[in-house]
Image: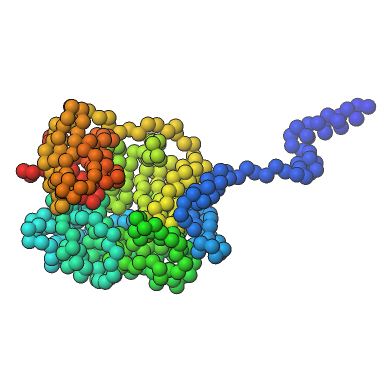
């Protein structure tokens, strides 16, 4: 009897210590591990169905690893061949951060300096004689930060890059304002940087970036130019919009897309995948001395210039935005980030790095001007706990400050007469009056010195810029135009 008690006691003790039989350890029907990306997958599929796009590819980086990489949809709409996480998409303007690295490599080699003048590095630019002084003051850093005053263009041209930027661009586009006063996004800045790279290295921009950046980052499925994408064969074709007023259609052949060698440095035809692009995120976070020194790398993601938009904490580094939070709709998430978007006629790219979380996200879709904001939020939420959203931290209206905006401003094509009526700021545009083009005289305040104007039923943002803190406004800025107050 005592032996039986001892054996039973020993059996109970072994069970408590994990010494049970194999039948007890392994359940015949174990519960499957929950999929941490199930919600994300659902959101991606919903976003894809809600956009004019044939496919979307998403990758997430966390703490040095790709933790998610999946693609959804078809390579060609309606033909049934699925995309994979290795399928190529176009990056668009997120190419600019690679161009910035290339320029900083030349600075590291003492071939140029940030304060070198554009006209000294790329001579014989045929700018208008009446704008000579302003052109001659454009510095390399002005190009890297969109402070040159050069008018924006899609840079959709073929030909020799250096020759085009010496002759055709300055002939066709007048400079909007003197350089160095404020940030105003403009693609030609980056085509000039591409011309600088070609001028100093005597290599084509595409070849230089492939050999000195893509190869070093082991981005072996990243290409600039159509020929390599065609040779690779695994690429997505998307919904193309050449003219927003005329709608768009799905491409079935790559030859249906416009070609542009002039815009390569700005991002007209760079091909890659989200996982490949996140190798750049890893470099921005952790560095690679064989590619670029750490001090110069840090300059890329340092706030070099404010965006001057509604008082929001948005800044620009070198080829990438450096922000204290991000906006989705009317919600604000206070997470520091480095980001850039990319849009071509047929593709959309979203690239975010959250340095304090060691997380990065890349979303590429085959459709023009797609909106995958819910996917971005779901992707971030799948790998970290999101903070509560807040109201946008715009600087509220203070009509007592409106007097500093009052005056007459002139651009190349329009005159803006700004006046104040009580607590309202009004705009009068003689050229629109003469053409019987309708517009609302009252400007709607958005935040700080940024207002919205309703012109012909289209809403445009107008930001008043001062050259001295607390002083009167000197410029009215919009991406398409800049007006300068009379007398300056």
The residue at 79%/40% (across/down) is: 24
Where is residue 245? Give x, y as percent: 34, 55
Where is residue 484? Give x, y as percent: 13, 45
Where, quadrant-wise, is the N terminus in this rendering?
A: top right
The residue at 13%/65% (across/down) is: 126
Q: How many marks?
A: 0
Residue projecting furthest to the front = 436
The quadrant where residue 197 appears: bottom left
- Relative height, residue 175 to residue 419 (above, below): below
> Which one is in front, 428 or 365?
428
Q: Is residue 466 visible?
A: no
> Which one is in front, 229 or 417?
417
Q: Is residue 327 visible?
A: yes
| Colouring scheme, one of rainbow, by chain, secondary structure, one colour | rainbow
Q: Is residue 209 rendered to the left or right of residue 359? A: left
Q: Is residue 420 rendered to the left or right of residue 231? A: left
Where is residue 353? Give x, y as percent: 40, 46
- Relative height, residue 296 to residue 221 (above, below): above
The quadrant where residue 323 appears: top left
Q: Is residue 334 rendered to the left or right of residue 42? A: left
The quadrant where residue 291 appears: bottom left
> Which one is in front, 345 or 62?
345
> Which one is in front, 309 or 77?
77
Where, quadrant-wise, is the C terminus in this rendering?
A: top left
The residue at 74%/37% (across/down) is: 18
The residue at 49%/57% (across/down) is: 55
Where is residue 229? Give x, y as percent: 43, 68
């Amino acid at each position: 009897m005592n032996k039986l008690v001892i054996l039973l006691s020993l059996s109970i003790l072994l069970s408590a210590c994990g010494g049970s039989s194999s039948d007890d350890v392994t359940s015949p029907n174990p519960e499957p591990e929950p999929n941490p990306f199930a919600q994300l997958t659902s959101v991606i599929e919903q976003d894809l169905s809600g956009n004019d796009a044939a496919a979307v590819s998403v990758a997430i980086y966390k703490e040095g690893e790709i933790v998610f990489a999946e693609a959804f949809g078809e390579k060609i709409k309606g033909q049934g061949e699925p995309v994979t996480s290795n399928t190529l998409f176009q990056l668009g303007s997120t190419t600019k951060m690679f161009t910035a690295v290339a320029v900083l490599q030349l600075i590291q080699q003492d071939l140029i300096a940030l304060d070198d003048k554009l006209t000294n590095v790329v001579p014989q630019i045929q700018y208008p004689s009446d704008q000579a002084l302003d052109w001659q003051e454009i510095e390399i850093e002005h190009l890297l930060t969109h402070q040159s005053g050069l008018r924006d263009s899609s840079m959709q041209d073929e030909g020799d890059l250096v020759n085009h930027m010496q002759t055709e661009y300055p002939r066709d586009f007048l400079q909007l304002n003197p350089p160095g006063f404020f940030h105003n996004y403009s693609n030609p800045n980056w085509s000039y940087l591409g011309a600088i790279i070609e001028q100093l290295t005597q290599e084509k921009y595409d070849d230089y970036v492939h050999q000195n950046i893509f190869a070093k980052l082991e981005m072996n499925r990243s290409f600039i130019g159509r020929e390599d994408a065609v040779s690779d064969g695994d690429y997505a074709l998307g919904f193309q919009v050449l003219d927003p007023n005329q709608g768009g259609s799905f491409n079935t052949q790559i030859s249906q897309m416009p070609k542009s060698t002039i815009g390569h440095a700005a991002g007209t035809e760079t091909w890659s995948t989200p996982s490949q692009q996140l190798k750049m995120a890893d470099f921005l976070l952790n560095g690679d001395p064989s590619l670029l020194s750490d001090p110069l790398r840090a300059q890329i993601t340092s706030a070099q210039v404010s965006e001057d938009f509604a008082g929001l904490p948005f800044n620009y580094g070198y080829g990438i935005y450096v922000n204290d939070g991000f906006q989705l709709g009317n919600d604000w998430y206070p997470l520091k980030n480095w980001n850039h978007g990319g849009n071509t006629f047929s593709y959309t790219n979203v690239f975010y790095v959250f340095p304090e979380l060691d997380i990065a996200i890349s979303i590429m879709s085959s459709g023009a001007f797609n909106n995958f904001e819910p996917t971005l939020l779901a992707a971030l939420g799948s790998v970290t706990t999101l903070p509560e959203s807040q109201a946008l931290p715009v600087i509220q209206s203070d009509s007592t400050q409106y007097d500093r905006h009052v005056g007459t401003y002139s651009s190349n094509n329009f005159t803006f007469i700004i006046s104040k009526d009580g607590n309202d700021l009004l705009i009068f545009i003689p050229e629109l009056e003469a053409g019987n083009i309708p517009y609302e005289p009252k400007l709607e305040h958005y935040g700080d010195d940024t207002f919205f104007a309703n012109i012909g039923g289209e809403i445009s943002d107008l930001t008043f810029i001062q050259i001295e803190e607390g002083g009167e406004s000197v410029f009215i800025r919009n991406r398409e135009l800049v007006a300068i107050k009379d007398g300056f």
